[in-house]
Image (cartoon, rainbow, N blue to C red):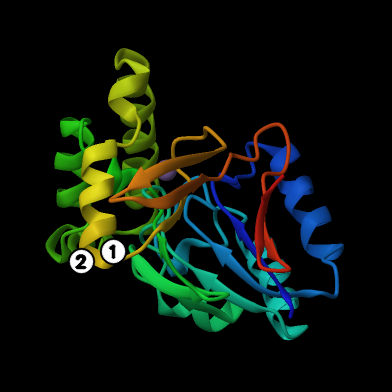
């Protein structure tokens, strides 16, 4: 069986040339055994609409994604809190299939709950409030109707705001809420969750109603690649 890769939080941007070249190396040296790649959000540091890809220099990344999908690798894109505005034009250009957050997919013989992860951070009330505004179709429509330069200014302002407020919050508030997670797992009858967002790569094993459950957390790409690989019926976090 082909391998399945999961990555997130690359935060690709012309401002961080290191992550750009890391992604370029990753995409040009993909092993032949890779059959599917799940992009689990914040692949881009921000997104201002599919017509704004070029102004951000994201067109080069789109080309790399297109090369991957053209080579026969199935690409899935689940949006994060930074690139939630990725849309169908992007999908058509790159060959990515868009997935809603959350999505449940079958990996091996298991149902796996995929999410970017910020929706699980329920202790961060401020983030949840701004999340529900930004994800509303009303905000989305109004934003996408603005001229590109206005959108760029707004996006940079939002990024600044999010970075400032992150510094003011204790780490624990910005992590996932375990009780909330367990409720979701029970409701969806899953024992495996894969997410990013927190930038704290780890495998958390815990007991869920007498059964073994696992949460895989992907790391960011600021200093090195973080990839979760499913091969030979096993998940490996590297
Ligand atoms: Mn995120």
The relative height of residue 217 versus residue 65 in the rendered view (above or below) is: above
- Considering every residue shown, the one lying at the far front of the view is 210
Q: Is mark 2 within 8 Å of ligand 1?
A: no
Q: Is residue 21 left or right of residue 228?
A: right
- As rendered, which of 217 and 8 lies closer to the eye? 217
Q: Is residue 169 left or right of residue 132?
A: right
Q: Is residue 143 left or right of residue 5?
A: left
Give the residue drawn at x 42%, y 79%. Answer: 88
Give the residue drawn at x 42%, y 51%. Answer: 213
**Residue 90 visible, this angle:** no
Give the residue drawn at x 33%, y 63%. Answer: 102
Q: Quadrant of residue 127?
A: top left
Tell me the CA gap for discs 1 and 2: 5 Å
- Which disc, if any, is residue 144? 1
- Which disc, if any, is residue 232? none
Identify the element where label 2 is drawn.
Answer: helix
Residue 210 % position (x, y): 33, 50
Say whether marks 1 and 2 touch (CB < 8 Å): yes
Quadrant of the drawing holding the C terminus: top right
Q: Quadrant of residue 74?
A: bottom right
Identify the element where label 1 is drawn.
Answer: helix
Write down the residue under mark 2. Answer: 141
Q: Is mark 1 within 8 Å of ligand 1?
A: no
Residue 76 % position (x, y): 53, 73
Q: Is residue 33 left or right of residue 81?
A: right
Number of callouts: 2
Q: Residues within 10 Å of mark 1 (few under 14, many from 20)?
A: some
The image quadrant in which ligand 1 is located: top left
**Residue 82 visible, this angle:** yes
Q: Quadrant of residue 136?
A: bottom left
Residue 82 % position (x, y): 41, 48
């Amino acid at each position: 069986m082909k391998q399945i890769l999961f990555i997130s939080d690359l935060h690709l941007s012309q401002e961080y040339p290191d992550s750009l070249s890391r992604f370029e190396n990753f995409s040009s040296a993909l092993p032949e055994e890779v059959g599917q790649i799940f992009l689990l959000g914040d692949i881009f540091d921000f997104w201002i609409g599919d017509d704004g890809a070029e102004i951000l220099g994201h067109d080069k990344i789109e080309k790399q994604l297109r090369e991957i999908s053209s080579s026969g690798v199935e690409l899935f894109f689940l949006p994060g809190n930074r690139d939630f505005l990725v849309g169908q034009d992007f999908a058509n250009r790159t060959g990515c299939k868009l997935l809603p957050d959350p999505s449940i997919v079958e990996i091996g013989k298991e149902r796996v709950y995929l999410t970017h992860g910020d929706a699980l951070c329920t202790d961060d009330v401020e983030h949840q409030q701004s999340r529900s505004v930004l994800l509303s179709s009303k905000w989305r429509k109004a934003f996408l109707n603005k001229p590109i330069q206005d959108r760029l200014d707004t996006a940079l302002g939002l990024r600044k705001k999010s970075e400032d407020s992150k510094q003011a919050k204790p780490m624990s508030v910005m992590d996932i809420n375990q009780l909330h997670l367990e409720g979701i797992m029970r409701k969806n009858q899953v024992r495996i969750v894969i997410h990013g967002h927190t930038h704290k790569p780890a495998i958390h094993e815990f007991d869920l109603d007498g059964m073994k459950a696992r949460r895989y957390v992907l790391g960011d790409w600021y200093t090195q690649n973080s990839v979760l690989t499913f091969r030979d019926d096993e998940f490996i976090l590297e």
